[in-house]
Amino acid sequence: MLDDIDNSAKHQYMDYAEELARSITSDDKQLNCLIKENLFTCLQSQEKWHSYLKNVDKASEYLQELIFIDPFDSVAYAANAFFSMSKNDMFDCRKYFEKAYLLGPPGVGMHLYYYAKSSEGQLPVNDIITLYEKAFEFDKDSVSPLLELLHWHDKNGEKIKMKSCANILISDNQLCSQLDQDEIAWIKNLRGS
């Protein structure tokens, strides 16, 4: 249905939704929390819309406003981090992911993973490995931190740690189900070496 609507009409709807979200006010503190959440969600949608339109400056403005609305919401920092990553701005990406994971849930494991990923080449290898270990501790169902640990342990010649990661990946059905056949073959090969 939305595909039948041209972009200018979509743009008008998005702007109207934002106008409505910004116009709602209340003296009630509890209701104000809901009003802020509604505006927050609207601005997230606006950022995605402007990113889709390649209007990077406007998308960035919406992302910064998310932080202004709620400077203690890790989601706002993560959104800014992914936006920075899409622009290949790894300095800001790293800074935002660090803040996101320090603020806590939701997504702590994912934020730690991407903080580690964006810190490669900027932090000592042992710090990177520690971050990937923490990421896995926060999210035991995520295969990405273990794959990175496997890579780093293999690269550093740490065979015992490498085999330990490989064993976890292959023996845990939830984790193994996330791997493709090439990854499974690679891991089994490392485990056997």
Image (cartoon, rainbow, N blue to C red):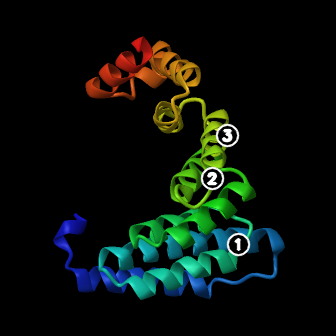
Mark seen at residue 40: none
Q: Which label lies toward us, 3 or 1? A: 3
Relative to 55, is 31 above or below?
A: above
Q: Residue 179 falls in which quadrant of the image?
A: top left
Mark seen at residue 70: 1
Q: Which residue is mark 3?
A: 134
Left or right of residue 1: residue 192: right
Q: Which label lies toward us, 2 or 1? A: 2
- The reply to whether discs 2 and 1 touch (Cβ–Cβ < 8 Å) is no
Callout 1, which amino acid?
Asp
- Image quarter where the C terminus lies is top left
Q: Position of residue 113 (x, y in %)?
A: 56, 47
Relative to 132, is 162 above or below?
A: above
Answer with mark 2 or mark 3, whichever residue precedes in sequence.
2
Answer with mark 3 or mark 1, whichever residue precedes in sequence.
1
Left or right of residue 75: residue 29: right
